[in-house]
Every structure is written in structure tokens, then in C-alpha cells.
Amino acid sequence: MKADTTDGPAGTTLAAKLDRLFSTVVPRGGGEYTHEEVAEAIRAKGGPTISATYLWQLRKGLRDNPTKRHLEALAAFFGVPPAYFFDSAEAERIDAELALLTALRDGPVRQIAMRANGLSARSLEAIADMVDRVRELEGLSPDAEAPGTTP
Amino acid sequence: MNVFRRLALRRRCRARLRDLPLPVPFDVHELCDRVATRRGRPIRLLPVAGLTGVCGLWIATGTTDLICYERDTTRPHQDHIVLHELAHVLCDHYPVSLPGKYDTTALFPDLDPAMVRAVLGRAGYSSAEEREAETLASLIRQRATTRADGTLHARLHDALDDDRE
């Protein structure tokens, strides 16, 4: 199995995915994990040896030859399924979830509830979009159509 | 859910229904306006395309309740969706004074819940609130249709309804 490290649509390279994980999975009240922290945490859990420098190179796209075990250990550390690195359909869904997580983390939304029976990537994107624009939507008249949703 | 908990749930919902300023003839948007006025918090209804699989969404901020519903579906279905989300608001499921809660398993089925908690600093909740909202929504619907058809049977049903148990 090989990670998708070749040129593809924007944001689908290994470097882009790793960068997204670093910038999204930020513990509340703290900063981004450093390359040293990630390398150390993977080592502490008995994972494969990976250096902070090599992690930085992967993230910058200077290297693109990680082993499957490296990618599995990185997925476990950041709390995403390993398929994130190997399966583009799965990656699309997971990216939508990560985008929603960022929108909730940074925005003014206090609660969110819904009836859902299995969310598609498109529904997740629609939800993230609502959450992103919640300030703008708050100011609309009570029955206005959400701008930008007209096909 | 056992029978006692189900009865307690219906009783709570009936009590809420009694206090509700139901418009006659019934209209969901008018009901939202009345509830918003009484709560002193605006409720915005937003038709959104592409919510298939979600139907409806309630988003609460510090000042406003937003109810999003699928734009490309029938009016009765839209009313049903809005009513369910309004029921969440009416049940005060997530009092704004408390830190927010998200249904993390529904929103982030692929992400590690521990990671989501670490990022958002909040806990998930169970499906109990969904059940309560659906119960209240269906009671409101029943009451609305009973009033609307105005037949002898309906008026009797209304008069004899056991909502003062």
C-alpha cells in the first residue's frame, strides 16, 4: 500500500494532509504540537522510530517516502483512521470532518444539534459552512434564505 | 427505554405543550416567532440546500438560535424538521449558560472522540435529547391537526385530552 504522495487536487498530497493535521488537531488552550512532541509521543507508544527532522521534511513535502507503519503511527497520534492517508474517498469525508472541527473550535457556536442518519461529505461541508458563517447568518431577517446556497 | 421513563418523558413534554402559545390556525413559522418573543432570543429559520441526511440543524450562539432546514423538500417535511429543532429549543436541552455540547459521534464519525474532546474541550451527549425533542414535536403536531380539523371527534379528543394528568 502506498500513500498518495503524487500530484493531485490541491490539498490531497501527503504534505498537505500532514500540515492539515498539525494545524487542526490543536489541544484546547495550547499551541500546535511540535515535530519533537509528535516524534516523542510515537516513540513512547512503542511505534516506529521517526525523527522530528524527518517529520518536518514530510510536512514540507521535501520527503515523500514514509513507511506504512510511519503513517499508521501518525494517524493514531492525530486521531484519524489510517485510511486518511491511503483512500481518497475516505480522505474527502475526513477532511470535511476536520474542517467542521476547525469551524467549531474557532467560532462562536455554543451548541449544535441535528437529526442525522449518516452524514455525507457534502452534508458535513454544508454544516461547516453554516458554522463558519454563523455571525453573518445571525444578522439576517428571520426567514431569509441563506446567502450562497442558491444553485 | 423502560415504561416509567417513557411516561415521565411524555408527561414532561405535555407540560411544555400546555405552556405553548400555539397559533390558530397552526403555522410553524408563527410559532417560532412567538417562542422567540417569549424567550427574548431571536430564532432564525434558514433554508439550506444540501442537508440531505441531516434534515435539520439547530445551532445556538451566545445571542441567537439558528434553525437550518433542507430547502429542497416539501413544505410539510420542512415544517416537521423545523418543529423538531424548535422542540430542542423549547426543552432547553443546552442551556446557553452551560458550556456547549456537541453530538461528537454524529458529527465526527471517523475521528477519535478523545481527540475531538481535546480540541473542543467539551463532552458529547447521548441520544436522550433527540428522543425528547421528537416526542414534543409529535405532540405539537397532534395538537395542531386536532385543532385544525375541528370535527366533533377532534373537539371531544381535545376536551378529553389527558394533558392535565
Image (cartoon, grey):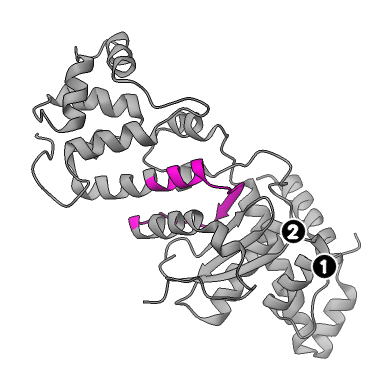
Q: What distance separates the C-alpha of mark 1 from that of mark 2?
A: 9 Å
> Both on one chain, marks 1 and 2?
yes
The residue positioned 31% from the left and 26% from the top of the image is: A76
Q: Of helix, strand and loop, which one carries label 2?
A: helix
Other residues around mark 1 within 10 Å, as few (<14) / some (14–19) / many (≥20): some
| Residue B101 counted in the magenta span | no
Q: Quadrant of residue A121?
A: bottom left
The residue positioned 80% from the left and 67% from the top of the image is: B37
Q: What amino acid is labelled 1 in the image?
A: Leu
Q: Quadrant of residue B156?
A: bottom right
Per the rendering, the mark at residue B20 is 1
Q: Are marks 1 and 2 in contact (CB under 8 Å)?
A: yes
| Residue A112 counted in the magenta span | yes
In the rendered image, residue B136, in percent from the top left (x then y), is placed at 71, 62
Please determine whether, in this image, residue B81 is positioned above or below residue B104: below
Chain holding disc 1 = B
A118 lies left or right of B143: left
Residue in front for this viewpoint, A139 or A91: A139
The residue positioned 46% from the left and 57% from the top of the image is: A127
Other residues around mark 2 within 10 Å, as few (<14) / some (14–19) / many (≥20): some
Q: What amino acid is labelled 2 in the image?
A: Leu
In the rendered image, residue B40, in percent from the top left (x then y), is placed at 80, 61
In the rendered image, residue A59, in percent from the top left (x then y), is placed at 21, 30
Chain holding disc 2 = B
* Magenta-tinted stretch: A99-121
In the rendered image, residue A97, in percent from the top left (x then y), is placed at 38, 46
Per the rendering, the mark at residue B90 is 2
Residue in front for this viewpoint, B122 or A129: A129
Residue B24 at least partly seen: yes
The residue positioned 77% from the left and 67% from the top of the image is: B35
Q: Quadrant of the C terminus of chain B?
A: bottom right
